[in-house]
Image: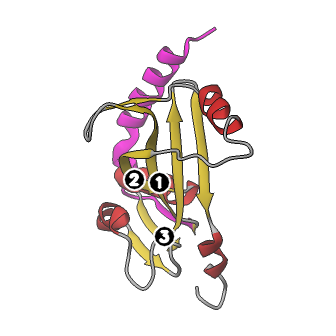
Amino acid sequence: MIQPEEFREQCAVKLLNLIGRASHLRAFVGLDGFVDEIVHVVDKRENAERFQRLSTIAALGERISTAAGKSTNIELVNQRTKLGGNGPIMANALAQLGVKVTYVGALGYPTLHPVFHDFAQHADVHSVAEAGHTDALEFEDGKIMLAKSVQLNDVTWQNI
């Protein structure tokens, strides 16, 4: 059985060998769009710049459970902000390979959200709605993605 690392290496070699063909391809992709904030959850704050993070989802669950019947504060610290959504991620990857991509979706309206600017340099991008937003709480054992997607309700035939 082939190991995952070897499989990834074989795929990368094949893709690199075929990259010249990509410029002859076209793709139409849509319709979602998210601004993803990758965040850490603070366990203990040491000072204004330094903190210890909650390392597991179970630790967050315990913190939340102990808040039942009272109030609590859970501090989130942004690690990076990036483009998100299945459509933009796939379209951006295709465009980076040289495919001529047209994208229609929720990337910021009336102006493109800055997180999509680099993508728009490599693709023909048309935004018809505000992007959704995800706070992706990142832990050593997984992620919890808190999505706000009501903006995607504006991706309609009329707006397109």
Spatial CA distance of label 2 from label 1 is 5 Å
**At 66% from the left edge and 83% from the top edge, which residue is drawn?**
156
Identify the amino acid type marked 2: Lys
N-terminal of the pair, mark 2 or mark 1, is: 1
| Residue in front for this viewpoint, 112 or 145 | 145
- Side of 53 relative to 115 (left or right): right
Residue 45 spot, x, y in % from top left: 37, 34
- Label 1 sits on a secondary structure element that is strand
**At 61% from the left edge and 41% from the top edge, which residue is drawn?**
144
Spatial CA distance of label 2 from label 3 is 17 Å
- Side of 64 relative to 125 (left or right): right
Mark 3 or 1, closer to the camera: 1
- Circles 3 and 1: CB distance less than 8 Å? no
Looking at the rendered structure, which numbered label has been put on residue 36?
Answer: 1
- Label 2 sits on a secondary structure element that is strand
Look at the image and say whether residue 54 sits in the magenta stretch. Answer: no
| Residue in front for this viewpoint, 143 or 55 | 55
Residue 5 spot, x, y in % from top left: 48, 16
Looking at the rendered structure, which numbered label has been put on residue 82?
Answer: 2
- Side of 114 relative to 143 (left or right): left
Residue 66 picture quarter = top right
Start-end of magenta stretch: 1-30
Instruction: Tell which residue pokes out farthest to the top in this image.
Output: 1
Residue 122 picture quarter = bottom left
- Circles 2 and 1: CB distance less than 8 Å? yes
Residue occupied by mark 3: 103
